[in-house]
Image (cartoon, helix red, strand yellow):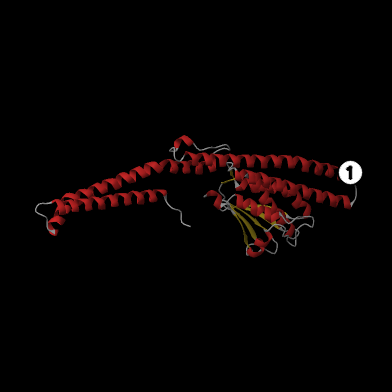
Amino acid sequence: MRARSLGGRLAVGLSLVAVLGALVLLGLVALEYGVGADPPLTAMQLAHEVADHVVAPLIILLGLVAIAGALVIRSGLRPLREAAIDVDLAAQTAPRGFRIDQDAFPSEAQPFAAAINRLLGRLDAAAEAQEAFAADAAHELKTPLTILSLELDKLPGESAMALRGDVAALSRLVDQLLMLARLDAQTAAETPKTSIDPRTIATDLIAALAPIALKTGRHLAFEDAGATDFPGHSEAVTAALRNLAENALRITPEHGTVTLIAGPGARLRIRDEGPGLSTQRLTELSQRGVRADHASPSGAGLGLSIVARIMMAHGGALRADEGCRELLLDFEGATQ
């Protein structure tokens, strides 16, 4: 349904009042000249009298009324336009707790401004509650996992080693789920984003994954394809790229290379030597609970689903280039 313009409705209303007033005035003048004139005027004389003494001044008056009405409407709606600009700017830069200035509104619009402030307050409270839950859950979940991992380190044998791997995978999954909870809270409260350098994200991740690559006989490489900074949440972007890089290491044959590419623009790419991934298959794997054939048996099928959530929160997109065997994190939407 098309939005109805408040300024347009006011203009139409004022125009109708002016036109009706003009018609009534014309009718009264015509009646006065037609009945009260001595001797009575002919139709032609009456038309000339009305045109000379009523219509011409009335046209000028209606023009002045139209200009004045437009200025009054524009002035009256200015606080609403300025408030919309302030709220839009605050959504990108203002810290949590931002409220619009109710006193800047006309008295008739102040209840509307107060309602917006109450809504902003509820969003802040919900975001704080979600962040508090994430912090509490991090402590309650991470502590027993850490203790379990330490106890498993004391046990010998391949079974203990496999369990340690499962616990490590579970710990990473918990970290990512808690990170998503924090990201959702930050998104809901429009927490200001920081400037992210794709080159730094990629090179830091290569350093973190180098031991895994060496252990499994794979190689990691980096390319700078003309990357540019973009606004975002660094922890979440790193988690998204790490998920893709770990998947690429799993599907790349031994002695193969996984390349992390920064750019062009606000993009991060992963190129591997696996079989490639079609756009349709990528869409399927981005659904929660759907797992690829190469996924870890202990996984929950959340890897690409988490990546898709992170990209959505940043206004970006996860794409596949089957021909180049690349997955692309496109953050161009975050820079708009």
297 horizontally vs 64: left or right: right
Q: Quadrant of residue 47?
A: bottom left
Q: Amino acid at mark 1?
A: Lys
Q: Which one is nearer the viewer's eye here, 129 or 246? A: 129
Q: Which one is nearer the viewer's eye here, 287 or 43? A: 43
Residue found farthest to the left: 39
Q: Which one is nearer the viewer's eye here, 92 or 246? A: 92
In x, y percent, where is residue 165? 81, 50
Q: Secondary structure at mark 1?
A: loop
Residue behind mark 1:
154
The relative height of residue 273 versus residue 310 in the rendered view (above or below) is: below
In x, y percent, where is residue 311? 62, 52
Q: Which one is nearer the viewer's eye here, 144 or 249? A: 144
85 horizontally vs 269: left or right: left
Seen at 37% across and 44% down, the residue is 74
The relative height of residue 46 versus residue 185 in the rendered view (above or below) is: below
Seen at 77% across and 43% down, the residue is 141
